[in-house]
Image: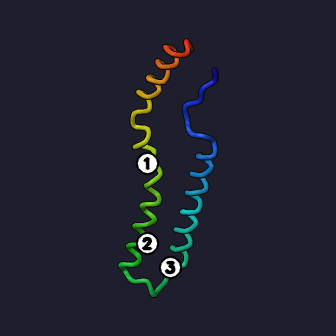
Amino acid sequence: MELRYRAPLWVYGFYLFWYLILTFGIVGLIGAGWAPEVTGGGKAMGMGIFAALLVAPPALHAIGTRRSAEELAELLDFLSEQAQAKH
């Protein structure tokens, strides 16, 4: 029995794509000097949205994997008891 306890490969590609798009967006906005008609509140909201998009994936990862070591131990115990699999 072959087991893998990590994210699928496409998830890593998605994160690479996600951060490249965000980086290009931020560089584009900074390079253009933002739109002059956008006032302080609009700029603050824009930066807040970009900050949330940058922080959300690592935060969701941290929340989703906070018990991963315990869950792995439970899965291995289950397999050894129910399927007589040995690690």
Q: Residues within 10 Å of mark 1 (few under 14, many from 20)?
A: few
The mark total stands at 3
Look at mark 2 in the image and give the residue it sits on.
Answer: 46
Task: Give residue 83's quadrant in the image.
Answer: top right
Mark yes or no: residue 86 visible.
no
Residue 4, placed above or below residue 40: above
Hey, what amino acid is under mark 1? Leu
Element at label 1: helix
* Quadrant location of the N terminus in the rendered image: top right
In the image, which disc is placed on residue 70? none
Mark 2 and mark 1 lie on one chain; the one further toward the N terminus is 2
- The residue depicted at 43 percent of the width and 42 percent of the height is 64
Q: Nearer the viewer, residue 3 or 18?
A: 3
Question: At label 2, which amino acid type do we have?
Answer: Gly
- Tell me which label, 1 or 3, sits earlier in the chain: 3
Q: Is any part of residue 19 visible from this angle?
A: yes
Q: CA distance from mark 2 to mark 1?
A: 21 Å
Q: Helix or strand or loop: what does disc 2 sit on?
A: helix
Residue extending farthest to the left is 41
At 43% from the left edge and 83% from the top edge, which residue is drawn? 38
The residue carrying mark 1 is 60
For the C terminus, the quadrant is: top right
Question: Which residue extends farthest bottom?
Answer: 37
Would you say 70 lies left or right of 6 here?
left
Give the label on residue 33, or none. 3
Q: Residues within 10 Å of mark 3 (few under 14, many from 20)?
A: few
Determine the residue positioned at 42% across, 69% down. Answer: 47
Residue at image point 55% right, 68% down: 25
